[in-house]
Image (spheres, rainbow, N blue to C red):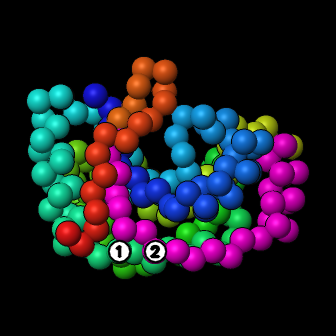
Amino acid sequence: MKLGIVIFPSKGFQDKVNSYRKRYDSHYALIPPHITVKDAFEVAEDDLSSVTDKLTQITAEAEPIEIEVTKVSSFAPTKNVIFFKVVNNEGLTSIFDALNDGSFYDKNAHPFVPHFTIGQGFSSQEFEDVYGQLKMAGIDHKETVDKVSLCYQLENGTWNVLETFKLGQ
């Protein structure tokens, strides 16, 4: 089964992100807005308990995390992806590092850039137009998150929450 580990923001902030994603994100219907802390990885169903044991251990040692969203940014020129940038901090980094040190289903393929995707799947011209508009809109949001979610992918590409782990328990 294909799993991924993410942090979901509050429902109110998800609604704000989704107001952009509905229009600009080709993956809008597949998963709610999130910060990916472990890229998708394959696990045999009988190994699932080792994944949940590891997440229980990591989240028990972590504290709730303050996230601060400060601006619109992009992965251009590598990818035409537009996102709300999340200020990286010790809490986010420690969870990412614990899940990506190589001992737990490999390392992430990309460096850790915490963000909420708001647009992807653009042609180059569309990307330039939309990115220019969204950069002017700006964003300023802070909240504390206290959960990490283990998600699984269905055959149609949709992601669902398998289990949620409270930080600091």
The magenta region covers 126-151
Q: Quadrant of residue 93?
A: bottom left
What residue is shown at x 38% (from left), y 57% (from top)? 37
Where residue 70 sits in the image (x, y, percent)?
65, 75
Tell me if I can see residue 76 in this picture: no
Examine the image and state in which quarter residue 17 appears: bottom right
Q: Is residue 3 above or below residue 169?
A: above
Percent position of residue 68, x then y: 56, 76
Q: What residue does disc 2 label?
A: 144
Q: Is residue 31 left or right of residue 135?
A: left
On screen, residue 105 above or below 16: above
**Callout 1, which amino acid?**
Pro
- The single residue placed furthest to the top in the displayed view is 155
Residue 132 lies within the magenta run: yes
Q: Residue at left 11%, top 44%?
A: 50
Q: Which residue is mark 1?
A: 64
Residue 163 x %, y %: 29, 46
**Badge 2: residue crowd in 10 Å (few <14, some 14–19, many ≥20):** few
- Label 1 Cα neighbours within 10 Å, binned few <14 / some 14-19 / many ≥20: some
Residue 140 falls within the magenta-colored stretch: yes
Q: Which mark is residue 76?
A: none
Quadrant of res 162: top left
Residue 60: horizontal and vertical position, in percent?
19, 68
- Disc 1 and disc 2: Cα gap in Å? 6 Å
Residue type, mark 2 in image: Thr
